[in-house]
Image (spheres, grey):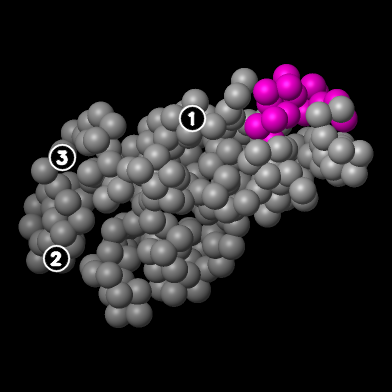
Amino acid sequence: MRVENSFIPVRGVGEKTERSLWEAGVTHWDDFRPDPVGETTAERIQSFIDEGYDRLADGDVTYFDQAFPNSEQWRLYDTFSEDACFFDIETTGLDHHRDSVTTVSFHQGGETETLVQGDDLSAESLRATLGEADLLVTFNGKRFDVPFLEESFGVDLDCPHLDLMYTCKKLDLSGGLKEIEQSIGIERDRPDISGRDAVRLWREHERGVDGSLETLIEYNREDAVNLRTLADEVTAALDERVFVG
């Protein structure tokens, strides 16, 4: 579902009214006609459409991120996925005040990049990558990845953010990223590695164990790449469940 199929950001339009519009054949902004709703609501919808087209032309993801209810932000994905940055971090623990970030992997525009502590992972490199993203896509990133990076590097990641953990919950998919991947058939090259192993691999790297860093980077990169597949799958499933088109 693209943002142009949606009317729910409009004040006075809830799920019931939006569905009635779709069922009346108004499934796209271009199809809008005022007769399925009252005059005041029709004026608000038309105003939203006019503004929306201007914002789309400008690529203004922030406008739509703020306009859509939190529970419906998954609808932004299809429109802005090509400019999205899928990212995942590995750390030495769960406490962002005490532990540190070891690797950060980004998947964007078909390319994947990994920054490593002690090499090229810095506030500047994070800003250079994440600062250019129109939409961040993570799994549990709002509670973990983003606060960890902001605390550790002093960066500001206040930009549109689709956290797939909440999107998955709308489909009754719960558990960690790997568990959800398995439940919907997303395969991994190294299914035997877990987040706990990522901590171990970093400690082994610090002790000079050959191959440990390479394995950690491979694991982290697969997390980031799989986020794209997961986002495609779950937003398509929600589209099929929600949209009357």
Question: Is the C-beta separation of discs 2 and 3 under 8 Å?
Answer: no
Q: In the image, which is nearer the foreground, mark 1 or mark 3?
A: 1
Q: Which residues are magenta?
A: 18-34
**Which residue is nearer to you in this view: 100 or 122?**
100
Task: Name which residue lies at 28% across and 64% down.
Answer: 91
Q: Residue at x 44, y 68 (%)?
A: 147
Decide which of tag 1 and tag 2 comes sooner along the chain.
2
Characterize the local packing of mark 1: few (<14), some (14-19) or many (20 or more) Cα atoms within 10 angstroms.
few
**Residue bearing mark 3:** 191
Query: What is the spatial separation of the Cα atoms under label 2 and label 3, in whole angstroms?
Result: 20 Å
Q: Earlier in the sequence, mark 1 or mark 3?
A: 3
Amino acid of disc 1: Arg
Query: How many tags in the picture?
Result: 3
Using residue 215 as the reference point, say whether residue 168 is left or right of it: right
* Residue 98 seen in the figure: yes
Q: Secondary structure at mark 1?
A: helix
Residue 223 in the image: above or below residue 156: above
Q: Which residue is mark 2?
A: 203
Tell me, for residue 67, which label it has, or none: none
Please tell me whether mark 1 or mark 2 is closer to you in this view.
1
Residue 87: x and y in percent read 41, 49
The residue that mark 1 highlights is 241
Identify which residue is drawn at 48% across, 39% down. Answer: 108
> Does the stretch in magenta take in 19?
yes
Which of 157/52 is in front? 52
Distance, label 1 to label 3, CA atoms, is 30 Å
Viewer-proximal residue among 45 and 87: 45
Quadrant housing residue 208: bottom left
Q: Dot 2: what SS?
A: helix
Give the CA distance from mark 1 to mark 2.
Answer: 45 Å
Q: How many residues crowd mark 3 within 10 Å: few (<14), some (14–19), many (20+)?
A: few
Give x and y (percent) for residue 163: 46, 51
